[in-house]
């Protein structure tokens, strides 16, 4: 929904929809929040988050805390832990950052383009699609 001066309006319903997409038990790597904190907080928190996000969009700035992520390494199986290639990195993003991203993606996904070679994190693309694609080249 567009408002005065074409500023994107973020509503409590937008936040509630984004919150409902969170998985239980996920932690952020920075301030110690879990997805469960937000999932069980209720409508009052959704209103405050909507106001926060609206101010970010209005002023065209995102706080460092919202954009902060922590990268941790997880060993792959039982392979040698002295070889860096035997680890995979995961990123723990801010719970509020995930909500902000989800709201923007829900609203603007139809206007965003990705590479034909990207298979992860895309609707209707799964590993077997990538394997099939790779097998044909």
Image (cartoon, helix red, strand yellow):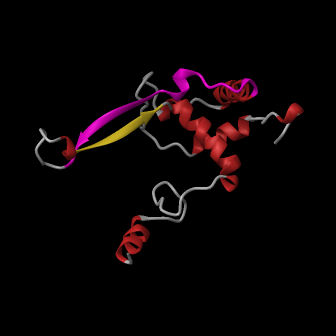
Q: Is residue 65 left or right of residue 129?
A: right
Residue situated furthest right in the rendering: 4
Q: Is residue 127 left or right of residue 107?
A: left
Q: Which residue is pictured at 46% across the width and 60% down the height? A: 119
| Image quarter hosting the N terminus | top right
Residue 16 part of the magenta segment: no
User: Which is nearer the eye, 129 or 36?
Assistant: 129
Q: Which residue is pictured at 78% across the width and 36% down the height? A: 8
Residue 74 part of the magenta segment: yes
Q: Is residue 15 left or right of residue 93?
A: right
Please state the horizontal and vertical placement of residue 129, each as a whole percent of the image.
Answer: 43, 70
Please state the horizontal and vertical placement of residue 3, each as a whole percent of the image.
Answer: 86, 35
Please state the horizontal and vertical placement of residue 132, each as a whole percent of the image.
Answer: 39, 74
Residue situated furthest bottom in the rendering: 136
The image quadrant that residue 130 belongs to is bottom left
User: Which is nearer the eye, 90 or 49?
Assistant: 90
The image quadrant that residue 128 belongs to is bottom left
Residue situated furthest front in the rendering: 137
| Image quarter hosting the C terminus | bottom left
Compared to 112, does 87 lie above or below? above
What's drawn in magenta, residue-wise? 58-76
The image quadrant that residue 40 belongs to is top right
Please state the horizontal and vertical placement of residue 30, each as a whole percent of the image.
Answer: 43, 24
Compared to 88, does 32 lie above or below? above
């Amino acid at each position: 929904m567009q408002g005065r001066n074409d500023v994107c309006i973020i509503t409590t319903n937008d936040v509630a929809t984004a919150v409902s997409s969170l998985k239980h038990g996920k932690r952020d790597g920075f301030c110690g929040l879990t997805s469960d904190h937000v999932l069980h907080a209720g409508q009052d928190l959704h209103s405050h988050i909507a106001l926060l996000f609206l101010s970010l969009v209005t002023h065209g700035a995102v706080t460092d805390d919202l954009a902060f992520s922590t990268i941790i390494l997880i060993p792959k199986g039982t392979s040698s832990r002295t070889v860096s290639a035997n680890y995979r990195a995961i990123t723990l993003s801010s719970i509020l950052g995930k909500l902000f991203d989800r709201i923007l993606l829900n609203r603007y996904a139809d206007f965003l383009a990705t590479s034909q070679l990207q298979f992860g994190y895309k609707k209707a693309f799964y590993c077997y699609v990538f394997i099939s694609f790779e097998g044909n080249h």
